[in-house]
Amino acid sequence: MTLSPLPVIRLLPKTKPQAIRRGYPWVYFNEVVTDRRTRSLAPGTIAVLEDAERSPLALVAVNPNSKIIGRVLDGPDAAHPDQDWFATRLRKAQSLRDRVFPTPFYRLVHAEADGLPGVIIDRFGDTAVIQPNAAWADVLLEDLAAALADVTGVTTILKNAGGRGRSLEGLDDVDAVLLGDAPDAALPVEMNGATYMADLLGGQKTGLFFDQRPNHAFAAQLARDARVLDVFSHVGGFGLAALAGGAMQTHCVDGSEAALALATEGARKMGAEDKLTTTKGDAFDVLTALGDENTHFELVVCDPPSFAPSHKAREAGLRAYERIARLSAPLVAEDGFLVLCSCSHAVDLTAFTGACLRGIGRAGRRAQLIHTGQAGPDHPLLPQLAESGYLKALFFRL
């Protein structure tokens, strides 16, 4: 047998290799032999993972400074990733999106589910934004960017270093332009008949949340002739979709003045600026004030940031989701609709639904659950990794 030139990390005898063999993509620090040699590996090192009997299991990216010490990249006999290796993965990801979407505006790479652990790539026409949220992707970023340009033909590639995962990996928060010129203004993106303005440099995450696209579309069906309240609206996600669906009026609430300005600009490009109003403020305070004013809407949507970004925050997150439901339910007109969303991977669908129903019940309302939504097909779920199915959208009729 030819020995691999790559370093080796080895599972502890107590660690069963079955999960890795069945497709689980992570190896935790407490599952491997962490001797001096392993601890001295540079973050981003490519290594071979062996079981306790020294049988090769997988090619992994190693970061001794992370709780996830190994991320599975390929089979144990695969070569060190290079530009061609990235191109193969990117072509596979591109083929799925080409089949589903008529225009090149989508998440191109959804991390582990697309075979590139910790890597997020969103595409905005001729521009792509990479979030390399794992050390190995930072180390090999030049090859990744070159393959991305070759496979997709994009002329601008931006590095976004704002992902929470980068801090957990011990990485910097420095953004960069990897190819071409950075856009000097927000880019218009059309989805579900609405126009969104994506700030790729100063906006949240990569500038736009593509994951809610199918849920925006379902909400738009409920919005005809309705008064709509979109809380935690960012750049007008549900609110602009509602206007495209024939809403009478939409009110967007967010803590960011810049995001609300982009929502207003999107409405203007749609010719619906007179139907959009905004409030900058804390969502809980605004919901409380609207309740005190006895204001009602036919459609209310609450799409907050993650209230439970880790398992440690799970219980506090569930209480926050219950509070959101309790405050928003009284604002829904009789036979109107309430949409409650969670992007917390630490809160599963059953727990989230329970929190929402407790809040709705505490508000004195009764609910029919008419639809349960998740992320779109450009955010595929890796069945072995529950965290990849993070997004939940519950549509209630009250």
Image (cartoon, helix red, strand yellow):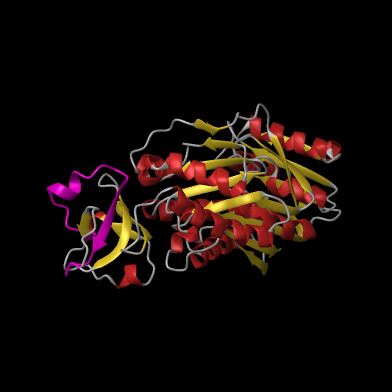
State left or right for residue 350 relative to residue 40: right
**Residue 142 placed where, x, y %?**
44, 39
State left or right for residue 255 relative to residue 131: right
* Quadrant location, the C terminus: bottom right
Is residue 326 among what the camera can see? no
Please give the name of the residue rendered at 23% of the width and 60% of the height, measured from the top-left corner: 31
* Quadrant location, the N terminus: bottom left
349 or 364: nearer the eye?
349
Q: Is residue 68 above or below residue 271?
A: below
- Asked if residue 48 is among those painted magenta in the image, a careful observer would answer yes
285 or 202: nearer the eye?
202
**Residue occupying the far top of the picture:** 184
State left or right for residue 62 relative to residue 11: right
384 or 240: nearer the eye?
384
222 or 391: nearer the eye?
391
**Residue 205 placed where, x, y %?**
54, 41
- Asked if residue 133 is among those painted magenta in the image, a careful observer would answer no
Is residue 204 among what the camera can see? yes
**Residue 318 placed where, x, y %?**
48, 56
Number of marks present in the image shown: 0
State left or right for residue 239 relative to residue 74: right
**Residue 199 placed where, x, y %?**
63, 34
The boundaries of the magenta stretch are: 31-54
Image-quadrant location for residue 187: top right
